[in-house]
Amino acid sequence: MKKYKIRTLSNISPSGLEVLSNSSCILDENCEDPDGILVRSTKFNQNYLNESLKAISRAGSGVNNIPVDLCTKKGVVVFNTPGANSNAVKELVLAALLLSSRNVFSSVDFVNNLQHFDKMEELEPFLEENKKKFKGRELSGATLGVVGLGAIGSKVARMGVALEMKVIGYDPALSVEAAWKLPSQVEPTETIEALFSKSDFITLHIPAIASTTGIVNFKLLQHAKKASLLNFARHEVVDDKSILKALDEKFLINFITDFPTPDLIKRANQNKDIILLPHIGASTSQAEENCAVMAVEQITEFLQTGNINNSVNFPNVNLPRSTKYRVAITNKNVPAMIGQITTSLGDLGLNISDMTNVSRGDVAYNLIDIENEVTDEALAKLSSIENVVNVRLIS
């Protein structure tokens, strides 16, 4: 059986790496020509995109550290692990909601600076007199706006319902499957502007892609009415200068984010209306294990069978194996490719038992089960077809 070499670029949970022991994949940290790479948030070095690399699996949801477009051009499948860390992020959003509504951070800071009191009879009346400065509001009855209703956003929405909040959501890319998972109490809004205008608390759970970069700008923030804004999505989806201006002009009461920047840190040191966390949304032992196991299972499944699940640049494919020889072909998504491929297989005397062809954007992917032996010469012939990106034998 062929052995596939896997290299890690980040610390991957041992629970995930244990999955390799039950597969035909082996961990080789020093190889320069891995078949697959496992990574977390480490920036991916493009030098690894050589002829041997077939897949990259990100133990986490964001893939902004990976050159996805370049990988697609080279026929390298990029996986992520949506939902594996969703509970960890949801729980931190709950903490952020409480921090933003009950002035917890300011209260703790206030009490920690009362070291000059030596007697309880002096401390108690002082606390009683000053506690009104930190009066907050309850979450129950407030309106929670959830931007993005995917794996994390849907859990946050359900949490809001459980907290007896009025929950509204905005997600133009919401799938039917995801919609079925939402509680009936979640009210959809047609525009993001409407959500900002109706919400007391706004929480962001959208990917950082071209269409969402800087989507939270000052024009949008002007629709908010003294709201609390939480960003546990990605730094790129908000414009820092707009956040600062919205805080100054009271469109926002406060801003809590898991993505500090120099400008935000300066503001946080001067005011209490910004709370910054060091990107700890998925930093739980359970989330790291879940992401690692899922990332390893996906990359080993792909290398061993050619099947694809949770890729960010290739279509999902699941073709049950019917023969000893399987060929995976990636090609540009242009007309007449299936005909060219099947004709070439016929010319080579290769009998097709089963096959599937799926596409996503500019890329198409074929899994073909062949009844007779596939030679190196046949693979070379298939690789020479115009617009074919790569060919792989899975035997």
Image: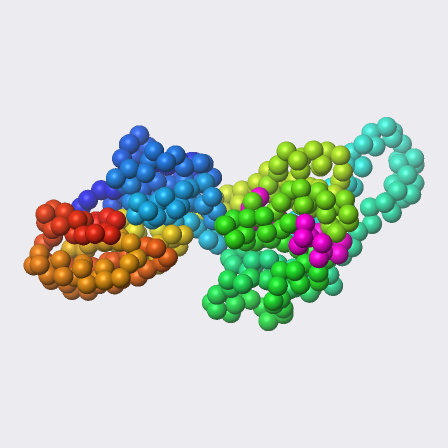
- Magenta includes 222? yes
23 or 165: nearer the viewer: 165
Query: Would residue 328 appear left or right of 295 to someone viewing this image?
Result: left
In this view, 44 is above or below 336 = above
Q: Is residue 279 magenta?
A: no
Seen as rendered, the residue at the extreme bottom is 184
Q: Nearer the viewer, residue 294 or 169?
A: 169
Q: Position of residue 366 (x, y in %)?
A: 25, 58
> In the image, what residue occupies the spot 67% across and 45% down?
242
Asked if residue 321 can be seen in this view, the reply is no
Total of numbered circles in the picture? Answer: 0
Image color mode: rainbow
Residue at coordinates 64% horizontally, 42% vertically from top-left? Answer: 240
Along the horizontal axis of the image, is 120 left or right of 202?
right
Q: Quadrant of residue 171?
A: bottom right
Q: Position of residue 346 (x, y in %)?
A: 10, 61
Q: Is residue 187 left or right of residue 53?
A: right
Q: Please identify the quarter of the rendering in which residue 371 is found.
A: bottom left
Q: Residue at x 11, y 46 (%)?
A: 376
- Residue at the image point whose x is 38% and y is 52% from the top: 313
Spot occupied by residue 23 in the image (x, y as percentages of width and height): 27, 47
Percent position of residue 63, x then y: 45, 45
Against 54, residue 316 (above or below) is below
Query: Does residue 375 appear left or right of residue 217 in this picture?
Result: left
Q: Answer whether residue 214 is visible to the viewer in this image.
A: yes
Q: Tell me the magenta residue range.
A: 218-235
Asked whether 75 or 121 is in front, the reply is 75
